[in-house]
């Protein structure tokens, strides 16, 4: 009897975690973009175009497993990642700690639509096409004039990019 009870408790915990996992991935699709990690070659292009300086404050909108937050922080900037999937938040915080970047790289479990973009000098985004119009309007009203935006794969509807490497686009406000 006790074994059956333990089995049922374990089954309930696994089912609950499974549901949270599925819900997190579905929520990401509704709120911005599904989780797809940027590959190493594209990270190199993003870093080239971002042209990070030590005085910069950078942000990755939808920071996934934290790979871009870590790459940007390795260039000397203070970097923030916003991510709604709790598993990815936990994993990226662990990666940041392991990389010894806890003083300069931060991942927040938060919907990036609710974050003020004013403090950031560099914004990196790997969204999906249909968020770009809304993001353009948000950056128009909130972001500072010297802002650089690096977009992985998607164009803003009204802004013209100033540089590109493959399908990575640089915008200057
Ligand atoms: C295409 S992935 C990019 C991950 C990472 N930036 C990279 O380039 O490897 C997009 C990420 O954004 C997250 N996301 C989607 N909508 C979001 C929102 N509104 N706020 C915070 N994170 C969001 C997803 O969970 C997913 O991890």
Image (cartoon, rainbow, N blue to C red):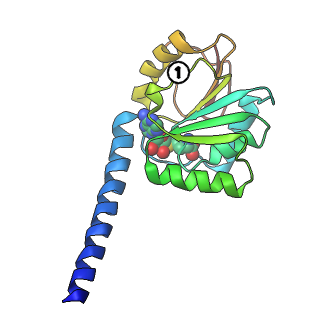
The residue at the point 36 percent across, 56 percent down is: 21
Would residue 141 be found to the left or right of residue 130 on screen? Answer: right
Q: Is residue 97 above or below residue 134?
A: below
SS for callout 1: loop
Point out residue 155 in the picture as x, y percentages from the top left corner. 52, 24
- Determine the residue located farthest toward the left in the rendered image: 1
Residue 20 in view in this figure: yes
Q: Position of residue 72 (x, y in %)?
A: 71, 39
Q: Quadrant of the N terminus?
A: bottom left
Residue 161 placement (x, y as % from top left): 62, 19
Q: Who is closer to the viewer here, 17 or 139?
A: 17
User: Which residue is denoted by mark 1 in the rendering?
Assistant: 116
Judge left or right: residue 79 versus residue 151. Answer: right
Q: Is residue 76 above or below residue 115?
A: below
Q: Determine the residue positioned at 61% across, 32% down.
A: 59
Q: Quadrant of the C terminus?
A: top right
Image quarter for residue 27? top left
Rendering coords of residue 163 (x, y %): 69, 23
Residue 157 in sight in this render: no
């Amino acid at each position: 009897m006790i074994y059956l009870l333990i089995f049922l408790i374990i089954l309930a915990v696994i089912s609950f975690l499974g549901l949270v996992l599925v819900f997190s991935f579905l929520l990401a699709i509704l709120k911005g973009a599904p989780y797809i990690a940027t590959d190493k070659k594209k990270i190199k292009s993003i870093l080239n175009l971002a042209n990070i300086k030590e005085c910069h404050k950078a942000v990755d909108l939808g920071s996934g497993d934290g790979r871009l937050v870590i790459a940007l922080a390795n260039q000397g900037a203070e970097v923030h990642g916003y991510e709604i999937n709790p598993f990815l938040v936990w994993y990226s915080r662990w990666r940041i700690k392991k990389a010894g970047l806890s003083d300069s790289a931060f991942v927040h479990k938060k919907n990036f639509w609710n974050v003020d973009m004013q403090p950031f000098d560099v914004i990196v985004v790997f969204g999906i096409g249909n968020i770009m119009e809304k993001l353009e309007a948000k950056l128009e009203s909130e972001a500072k004039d010297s802002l650089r935006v690096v977009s992985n794969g998607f164009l803003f509807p009204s802004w013209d990019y100033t540089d590109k490497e493959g399908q990575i686009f640089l915008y200057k406000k």
